[in-house]
Image (cartoon, coloured by chain):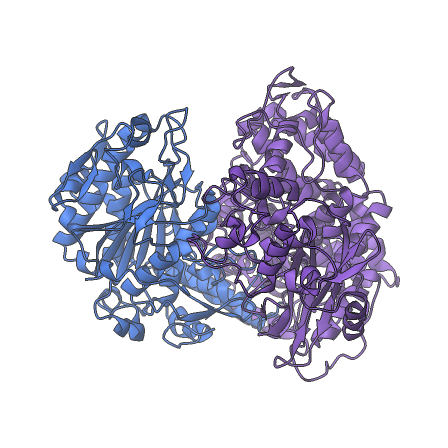
Amino acid sequence: MKRCDGVHRREFLRVGGIPLLGLSLGSVLSGPTWAGNLANRRRITARNCILIWLDGGPSHMDTFDLKPDAPSEVRGELRPIATNVDGMQISQHFEQLAKTADKICVIRSLTSELGVHGLGSQYVLTGHKPSPVLQYPSFGSVAARCSDQPSLLPPYITVGEQQLQAGSSLGSGYLPDTYSPFAIEADPSRPEFRVRDLDMRRGMTLESLQRRREFLNALDQLSDQVEKSAIQDGVDAAANQDAFGRAYRLILSEQAKQAFDLTAEPGALRDRYGKIYNRRSRVGQSCLLARRLIEAGCRFVTVTDSGWDMHGGIYQALQRKLPALDQAISALIGDLDQRGLLSETLVLVLGEFGRTPRLNAAAGRDHWPRAFSAMMAGGPVKTGQVIGTTDPRGYQPVDRPVSPTDLARTVYEMLGIDPDRKFLTDGGRPVMVSPGGQTIDECLA
Amino acid sequence: MKSSIEVCRQYAVRPVTAIRHVAVAALIWMLGWGGSWAAASDGLSIPEFKNDVVPVLTKSGCNSAACHGAAIGRGGLRLSLLGYDPEHDYQQLVNQFKGRRVNVADPEKSLMLLKPSRQIRHGGGRRLAIDQPGYEIVRQWIAAGADMAARRNVVDLIVAPAEITLESLDEQFQISIAAKYDDGSTRDVTRWTVFEPSDRAAVRCDSGGKVTVLRRGQSSLMVRFLGFVDCVTVTVPLTDQPPATASRPASNYIDEHINRVLDRLRLDHSPKSNDATFVRRIYLDLIGTLPTPAETKKFLHDSSPDKRDELVERLMQRSEFVDHWSYKWSDLLRIESRRLGETGASAFHQWLRQQIADNRPLDEFANELLSARGDAHATGAANFHRVPMDARQQAEYVSQVFLGIRLQCANCHNHPLDRWSQDDYHGLAAVFARIDRGQVVKIDERGEVIHPTTGKAAKPRIPGEIFLDQSDNPRQKLAEWMTDETNPFFARNLVNRVWREMMGRGLVEPVDDHRPTNPPTHPALLAALHKDFIENQFNLRQLIQTIVQSEAYQRSGLASGNNHNDQTFYARSISRRLSPPVMVDAVSAVTGIAEQFAGLDATRAISLGDSQIRSLPLDLLGRCRRDSSCTPNQGTSGDGLPLTLHIINGSWINDKLDDPNGRLRQLLNGNDDQTVIEQFYWLAYCRPPSPAERDYWVQQLASDGDATKRATLFADFVWAILNSTEFRAIH
């Protein structure tokens, strides 16, 4: 199996796997853009991506696409407010974001046909319509696959609860498990937050730790009982070695481990990412963690914020969710900008679909894939604009419809990944990263 | 309106015989009316709505889920999805909209023709061109009075070829479809049949049924005409070279089917596994337990020619067989205490264990679950009704577990890839609408499921079949239908699930997604297993026995000839990862230190009945949480960094290695290095080390009389064994 840069995966294991201490953090952090030779398709590309996934499907009608002139059962309780961009209006709960609207781009004309959580998530997170014969990789897994420099941190990390509507859509699909995300399920807003098993066990010596790795290698090499030529088996010696290689690199680097330590951030900055009822919000602290991870060399962080599947009592729920999201995103954009990371980090905020324009009997909104919104910032995004329009009641786009496939193509182009590039599946079948679709050109600076 | 015959037909499997497709095609040509398009234009008869017009609508995409076949229709016109309900469609087209859709006096002015031919604005673009046969059929039908009369009904489709092997990718071939009618007539309907490749990258098919194969291997094409769905299997051998292994051994009918496909693909098969590999594999597969060194050695020294069969018999009597298979069923049935409470979960698990121990026929097993009532703390099976939160969830749960189908899509609209309608979904939910899911499960007097389209109470319904009466115990009717020998789903789903457990891959994948558009890799084999299973009264142990006796199961996993890439056709055994509980138990068995589960006496993970029982290793290994259905290898953390980090730095394995009562400490006492090394090979791998392995480890683990160093070296060695690929695999 070839990597993006043409290095065979097994060669990589030999190159990158054995010399445990041979990598310095510096060489990793200051490397060239990760997309390598693919980057020249577009001059400006983002090196990193932070995806804020609003699991369950946020209401477009109450976030980025309000309809104040619609009848009350459609417009709901929230009102739009003006932003620092002429003519751009967003939800009244997005007070902070309204002040930095010049740094965001809103797409209002996303549209899909898939209104079930699992299928919708797969479609939006992979750009492929779900198929019975193939599970497609998420953006993050493709980005990990294309990350051509070894990083001490896993290239793809997810921060959020495990039980998600999105389920396996955040995974590596037909790509090897190696490109699955490193999932941090602990809540970063809790004082006791830490990533489990990162520190060496008491009583364990470095010598013993290294020897175990060598012994493991030797056992796999000496055994002739498990087929080695076939990398697609459920049990794969190369993948096993690879998994331990990654774990060892992480454990042996103090600097890399620091990236997970939120206590290293000043309290004032932590607060800026948002408080709800005087407690730091989970989504806010997750965004802060995402920034630290990106800073330390991770390429793709997905922050999942669950609880957006609001079939009933939507306004009580939004009263908590929207301000938290507002503070988190605006702080993230500001923080990245201040550190000079915004220009090389794409920030993407969306969920699997929108919600029914008409409120239901339980004062909620149900699934509505025909129209939904996304927000982008950073990287090569042309900001301070709104793309697309929906009809006066938010049922479907009337202008510039954008399919998840179009969005995927655009995201890949922004990240310098050729959407037409092919990867091999288990069965040796070449599959394009994101075939079809049109790049949303007006998105790009 | 579908008869049960139609349902069976959809899933029935065409016998795999060496049909000379050319001859059959010629026969159809002679029997039929010869034209590649049909009925009307040859002047022989007037087109009929059901038999001629509906196929035109389907073929032209009019009634697809994206257009007028959507639950809410499009542009004011709502047709049944893929024409499954012609009477409804007739009403819509002829009587609704003030009759403007058809104009009998001036057929060309019918909206039904003006719109799709785009003479006036049509959101769906041009679907019927004026000079094309489809337009002409609709026009003639209208001109003749646009009636609903049908002189005949389709009873079968004849697909030729049903399967075909091409020599190379350059070859093309033509599919012919003939419809057989109840009056004995036959007609070529190729022109009006919809063709859908299961994988568009592998096969391309034009609208007239001409097929081009793009990739070597086996692929399939679904064909659909009216309510009938069938499949064409296309093979292009993986290589031009004849296989090196000319003759293929066969133990039972399974091998005949498997071998036929291997022959077609020119795929070599691997030889039979050796005894050491077999004994480890069969123990892990049947009882989720590693054989002890004594058990392994006894089997290796046994000279009986039937020793493999005898071992299988013995293992199926072991109590661990009950543990292991109850665990699998618990995953499927979602036994967990958050929903059921600890007492309920425990009662359900106890009931389940009893069924497995008694080898209860699975039809009776399902029947008892569906009709269970009473106090769920005392009557284990009653918990079945408490797993889902409401009737709709129960419809999804039952159809997924027992029928192997995903009905969820049909909640909001008719299923886009299958034949399930909203009536089916809400009708099945209505069957469960009156169940009181409290601790005492009982049937209420009231309770409805509201059909979202009509806004009224949905009528209970057996999916795809008939409506039931709410007052006439619809649950019992459902159970009878489901477990009837002619039911096309139930037994097929169960044999496919068991097959996957034993062979590493379902004949249909995913196992809960049986539908005509997702055909099995070996249709004839699945049909044969299905038939055999029914003939043996739904006997789980017998099914397992038949599978493990096959050469296909007993093959080596090592590549042979050209089969190293095979993961689909059973040319070699598919290595599988030890499941989370089996892995936990295997680590305990090798280290000699049992895993502790808080507050429980149980020391075997496979004996746990509730997925809420806390266990960090099980979580990190990616056990099924049982809050929704689990398909293996879907988690994000199953093989992830968190597990690897825990293995390196965490307590699970390290504590066991450090334990003074552990096997390592004991063996180091009074045994020389080589003995200890060999013993761990037997424990973990069920084989002695090869001379190269033995020599390597004797040298690596030499400690020059330093006891502390020796303990450390050996701990590192055992740690490495537990994480080696061979140990973590059923191979």
Against A410, residue A321 (above or below) is above
Against B111, residue A327 (above or below) is above
- A97 to the left or right of A8: left
Q: Residue at x 81, y 48 (%)?
A: B533
Res. B629 image quadrant: top right
Q: Which residue appears farthest toward the front when viewing the image?
A: B105
- A199 to the left or right of B634: left
Against B424, residue A255 (above or below) is below
Tag count: 0
Res. A23 image quadrant: bottom left
> x%, y% of residue A113?
44, 48
Res. B570 image quadrant: bottom right
In what quadrant of the picture does the C terminus of chain A appear? bottom left
Q: Which residue appears farthest toward the top when viewing the image?
A: B445
Q: Is residue B289 visible?
A: no
Chain coloured purple in this rendering: B
Chain coloured blue in this rendering: A
Q: Which residue appears farthest toward the bottom when viewing the image?
A: B241
> x%, y% of residue B242?
72, 83
- B275 to the left or right of A278: right
Q: Nearer the viewer, residue B288 or B26?
A: B26
Q: Is residue B425 visible?
A: yes
> x%, y% of residue A336?
18, 52
Q: Residue at x 32, y 53 (%)?
A: A301
Q: Nearer the viewer, residue A137 or A242?
A: A137
> x%, y% of residue B724?
55, 61
